[in-house]
């Protein structure tokens, strides 16, 4: 908690900390999805099994939470997590997933809802764009 000066009294700002699992597996930079989308990178097929590890990581948030919801939880209880489930159903599969090889495995930059939809539809492969780490300087916010 951080206290600031305010003529009418102290101001309290809560700083949310990323869960340790997100710190362990996630990127250590913030990127612009629009900048990622603008990259000219070829599309190729990838087995979903290479990306399934994402389903057990809380990359999503509940309404009052912070990185506390996994794709597998949403798939197991779609009525409970209706908002996130609707996003999965509406995911536009015409766009490839954007991934980067990070910490010894492929990590999504964009497309988790599409990946989950592909799994739900029992697809074996998804279209991906493999973004090189050389592009980090081009996609950071």
Image (cartoon, rainbow, N blue to C red):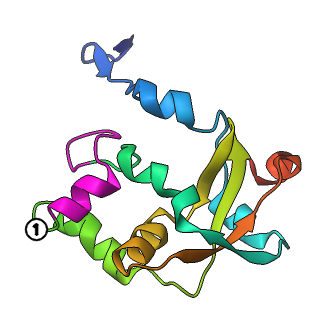
- Can you tell which quarter of the image residue 37 is in? bottom right
58 or 44, which is in the foreground?
A: 44
Q: Is residue 16 left or right of residue 36?
A: left
**For mark 1, what is the residue?**
79
Position of residue 19 measured from the top left corner of the image (x, y, whole percent):
39, 28
**Residue ranking furthest to the bottom:** 94
39 or 48, which is in the foreground?
A: 48
Image point (40%, 43%), residue name = 57
Image point (67%, 66%), residue name = 34
104 or 6, which is in the foreground?
A: 104
Is residue 141 visible in the rendered image? The answer is: no
- Can you tell which quarter of the image residue 72 is in? bottom left
Residue 31 lies, with reference to residue 81, above or below; the image says: above
Q: Report the magenta residues as a range.
A: 62-77
Badge 1 marks a residue whose secondary structure is loop
Is residue 9 visible in the rendered image? The answer is: yes
Q: Is residue 134 left or right of residue 136?
A: right
Image point (43%, 24%), residue name = 20
Image point (82%, 76%), residue name = 42
Magenta stretch mostly in which secondary structure? Answer: loop
Q: Is residue 57 left or right of residue 85?
A: right
Position of residue 61 measured from the top left corner of the image (x, y, whole percent):
31, 47
Identify the image quadrant of the N terminus. Answer: top left
**Residue ranking furthest to the left:** 79
Position of residue 64 measured from the top left corner of the image (x, y, whole percent):
20, 43
């Amino acid at each position: 908690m951080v206290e600031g000066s305010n003529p009418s009294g102290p101001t309290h700002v809560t700083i949310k900390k990323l869960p340790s699992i997100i710190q362990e597996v996630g990127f250590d930079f913030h990127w612009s999805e629009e900048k990622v989308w603008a990259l000219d990178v070829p599309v190729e097929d990838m087995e979903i099994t290479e990306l399934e590890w994402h389903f057990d990581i809380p990359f999503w948030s509940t309404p009052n939470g912070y990185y506390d919801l996994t794709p597998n939880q949403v798939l197991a209880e779609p009525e409970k997590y209706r908002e996130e489930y609707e996003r999965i159903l509406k995911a536009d599969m015409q766009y490839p997933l954007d991934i980067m090889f990070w910490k010894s495995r492929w990590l999504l930059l964009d497309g988790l809802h599409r990946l989950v939809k592909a799994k739900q539809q029992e697809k074996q492969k998804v279209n991906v764009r493999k973004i090189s780490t050389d592009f980090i300087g081009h996609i950071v916010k």
